[in-house]
Image: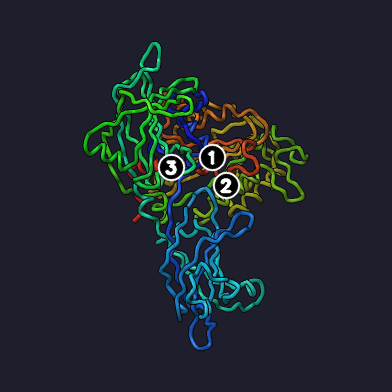
Amino acid sequence: MGNCCDGGGGTAIGGADFPPVDGLNDAVDYFLTSNGHHGLFSQIELSLSASNLPDRDVLSKSDPMVVIYGKGRDGVLKELGRTEVVLNSLNPKWIRKHTVAYHFEVVQTLLFRVYDVDSQWHNLDVKMLKLDDQEFLGEATCTLSEIVTKTYKSLTLDLVHEDESNGSNHPRNFGTLTVHAEESVISKTRTELIFRCSDLESKDLFSKSDPFLVISKAVESGNRIPICKTEVLQNDLNPTWKPVCLNVQQVGSKDTPLIIECFDFNSNGKHNLIGTVQESLAGLEKLHSVGQGKHLFVPTAVGHNHHEKICKSQLFVDKFCVKVEHTFLDYLSHGCQLNFMVAIDFTASNGNPRLPDSLHYIDPSGRPNAYQRAILDVGEVLQFYDSDKRFPAWGFGARPIDGPVSHCFNLNGSSNYCEVEGIPGIMTSYTNALFNVSLAGPTLFGHVISTAAQIAAQALANHQQKYFVLLIITDGVITDLQETKDALVMASDLPLSILIVGVGGADFKEMEILDADKYDKLESSTGRVASRDIVQFVPFRDVHSGEASVVQSLLAELPTQFLTYMRTRDIHPNT
């Protein structure tokens, strides 16, 4: 998505302090991503049909209606919508579609309940119907990701009856429900813009301003949600920035007010506001078509009155181009696989696994430790995108029985193959490994990253449309920083992303260097720069109850990394 970042929530960026980090553009990126403005979502329209429903009416066929629920992690149901009632049909095709927002980083469980609506209620709006007064025909459940990854985005589910779902050896046939998902065109539409400013005010004493733009969306609460930014241009009072891209769904509509703020970059993070323009996409399109600029203004306050000081500076739109492009879901529904891999830190700094204060301690009560939690949380999201659910799993930093310290050993104990069966296979292999290796050290990432990269490179050589996601869980600071950088720079050209979870109380400052959201792009020992950012790092302790989960923080940027790889290499979905 270029310099775009999707997401919602947050406050205005104007006047805020940016954390002082290395690199002009990465400082701005850090502000946006640290406030959660990076998740990619799509609007999905669900269409429903059923076959062979049970007939509950004596003199006619059933009159079915479907109620759609979202099911939270706590099991609580939230009604999302209802279809219309189809009269006298055991094979209904409902016309009313239901729109849901698809979020890659969240497991979105859906529940569909089918009812036969009694004829005495046919004149009521379906929203007014009391479900206790209708006859329950059956229900089906699935995740939204199961639907959107199917060929043609259609999934057929068997309907079950709550009274008989756990019992009979000869379960009755309650029919089937087919769910079809269609990604809305607005999710595929993006607008590419080139902005230019003239006669900017110089905010620096001994040089010209270093300007960049931040584009925000105004919401009803009065807050501003940052959705896009340009790069920083040094010493330039008449800057023309590289193209930026806005997804229409980020903005809301072409008439939604946008606030475009021009800042002068300061290395201490306290960027000076040069001026502001408020305009909608429709307005920006008009500016482009007539070739006119719009004057920046600076908000000023005199007493209780607020005024706008009009500046000499103007904002121009040199390019306004609307495109319809392949989306993340287009690739998935046409057979592209996301392959999950995991590497676990077995260094001695984790502590003796047999003692309760160890990060590897297996609690007899069944409560997962931090390693198990990370595997479960990431795995439960990614497993739906891998058809065979056979996951490569490694350990590093331990001494297998009667062997030297290994920095990449197969978690299943095999010397021939590294794959395990599903998330339960990873969990079992991890537990077994704790009793079959001796924790050692040091902490080296280079070996496991290179091994994962070899698998990705082989799939690429075989012309397989696969994208690989390596989860590394560690408790300590790596001691092969430059070797890890070299491996990551090489891997940046491959269909691979790397998620790193830091557990325990170590200082993970060096780990954050690997995440280009916060620092400059990685450079290898030979001077080669990574072609793209493929690393996301999150300390486990930074996420507390009630906040966004580690999984959401880690996975939110994956679709954008995926699309960056596919688009820059002109790779299209399988036909």
Q: What residue appears at the point 52 percent right and 26 percent down from the top-left corner?
A: 19
Gap in Å between the C-alphas at discs 3 and 2?
Answer: 17 Å
> What amino acid is labelled 1 in the image?
Leu
Residue placed under numbered mark 1 in the picture: 499
> What amino acid is labelled 2 in the image?
Val
Query: Colour scheme of this structure image?
Result: rainbow
Residue placed under numbered mark 3 in the picture: 560
Q: In the image, is 114 to the left or to the right of 364?
A: left
Tell me residue 456's x, y (percent): 45, 43
Q: Is residue 493 visible?
A: no
**Mark 1 residue crowding within 10 angstroms, few (<14) / some (14–19) / many (20+):** many
Give yes or no for contact between labels 1 and 3 (Cβ–Cβ under 8 Å). no
Residue furthest to the bottom in view is 59
Q: Is residue 465 above or below residue 166?
A: above
Q: Is residue 397 visible?
A: yes
Which mark is drawn over residue 378?
Answer: 2
Dividing the picture into quarters, in which one does residue 162 lie?
bottom right
Which mark is drawn over residue 431?
Answer: none
SS category of the residue bearing label 3: helix
Gap in Å between the C-alphas at discs 1 and 3?
Answer: 14 Å
378 and 466: which is toward the camera: 378
Mark closer to the observer (3, 2): 3
Q: Is residue 147 above or below residue 163?
A: above
Mark closer to the observer (1, 3): 3
Tell me residue 522's x, y (percent): 46, 28
